Amino acid sequence: MPDRADRKAAFLSRAGWAGAECRFLAGDASARSYDRLTRAGKTAILMDAPPDRGEDVDSFVAIARHLTAIGLSAPTILAEDRDQGFLVLEDLGDDLFARLTDRDPSTEPVLYAAAVDVLVHLQSQPPAPDLPDASATDWAEAAAVALDWYRYAITGERIDTALFRHILQTALNAHANGPRVMILRDYHAENLLWLPWRAGVARVGVLDFQLAQLGQPGYDLVSLCQDARRDVSPDMETAMIRRFVAEKGLEDSGFAASYAVLGAQRALRILGVFARLCLVMGKPGYTALIPRVWAQLQQNLAHPALAELSLLCADLLPDPSENRLERIRSQCAKPAP
């Protein structure tokens, strides 16, 4: 049988990109990878999502086309072989929000305001069809990986997560289980591109949206403002929350509770995911991000709506001291071939 490289070459030939220079662009926590194709002065992006490693491009294709249809800037799909897990995508450039703001912090207010406007627009439109709609029980279960993997990686102990899940589910039901909107889930500065030659909400290019689902209005705002990969100042976070609340016509105090509960759920899940990426998938680099996510968790747990969960987390979850992070790294699996 042909190997992955042979399949890739055959796809590129069928797609009209035979002989193109192929330069690695990015990978992520999944098995997907991206290459920039260059030929005759033109560029495109190759997505390689191996089906035998659990990847599926169908959701990416469906969400990309939905976002484009409602006036947002997802990459146009130029060629596809869904069975093999290959897509050729429009090249939206290299101006990721993370890079632009690192080079020039004065750009951050404009970029983040534009990103908030995209969320408001997205949530004002009908969602894509057939999106998953997780219950509060499901969201609480997803956060339990903080105990199953982060706590386990430090203590070596497996514990019953039932009480943890019950307390978080109760908070979600009380403050973050209302009418659903479409959420993109990984909405942060490394997945957003600045396209200033376009107009309005189309100035923000959106990437890595294949896990879109139905959820609560504040979830993607938390993802943007409590970024696991870069610091967002408290003043910027407050300004973007105010912008979102004003544009959505929400009530401040109720949204604050929802935002904190969603933020806690997200931070807990990420702590577990980052530990699992090290222990199972051989990716220790994510452990360097754990202290930032821990600080975000503590910020969210300080909200009165999470008083009971805060006490339980203080009892069950060790803080990520350098010694504890080193313990996680010391158990890192061998990288997948």
Image (cartoon, rainbow, N blue to C red):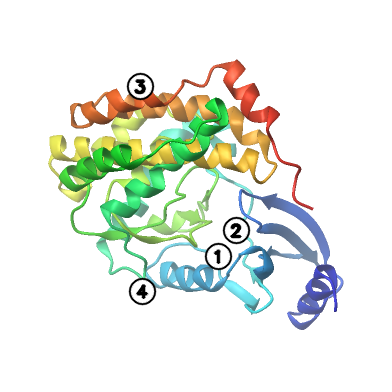
Q: From the top left corner, tell me how far across and down residue 46 is, in percent.
A: 70, 65
- Residue 15 visible: yes
Residue under numbered circle 3 = 314
Residue under numbered circle 1 = 75
- The numbered mark, 1 or 2, whose residue comes first in the sequence reads 1
Marks 1, 3: nearer the viewer: 3
Inter-mark Cα distance, 3 to 4:
38 Å
Amino acid at dot 3:
Ala
- The numbered mark, 1 or 4, whose residue comes first in the sequence reads 1
Amino acid at dot 4:
Asp
Pick the residue in front: 11 or 6.
6
Residue at 64% over, 77% down: 80
Q: From the top left corner, tell me how far across and down residue 163 is, in percent.
A: 29, 38
Specify few, some or many for label 2: CA neighbours under 10 Å numbering under 14, 14-19, or 20 or more.
Answer: many
Residue under numbered circle 4 = 130
Tags 2 and 4 in contact by the CB under 8 Å rule?
no
Residue at 73% over, 59% down: 36
Tags 1 and 3 in contact by the CB under 8 Å rule?
no
Q: Secondary structure at mark 4?
A: loop
Inter-mark Cα distance, 3 to 2:
44 Å
Marks 1, 4: nearer the viewer: 4
Tags 1 and 2 in contact by the CB under 8 Å rule?
yes
- The numbered mark, 3 or 2, whose residue comes first in the sequence reads 2
Amino acid at dot 2:
Leu
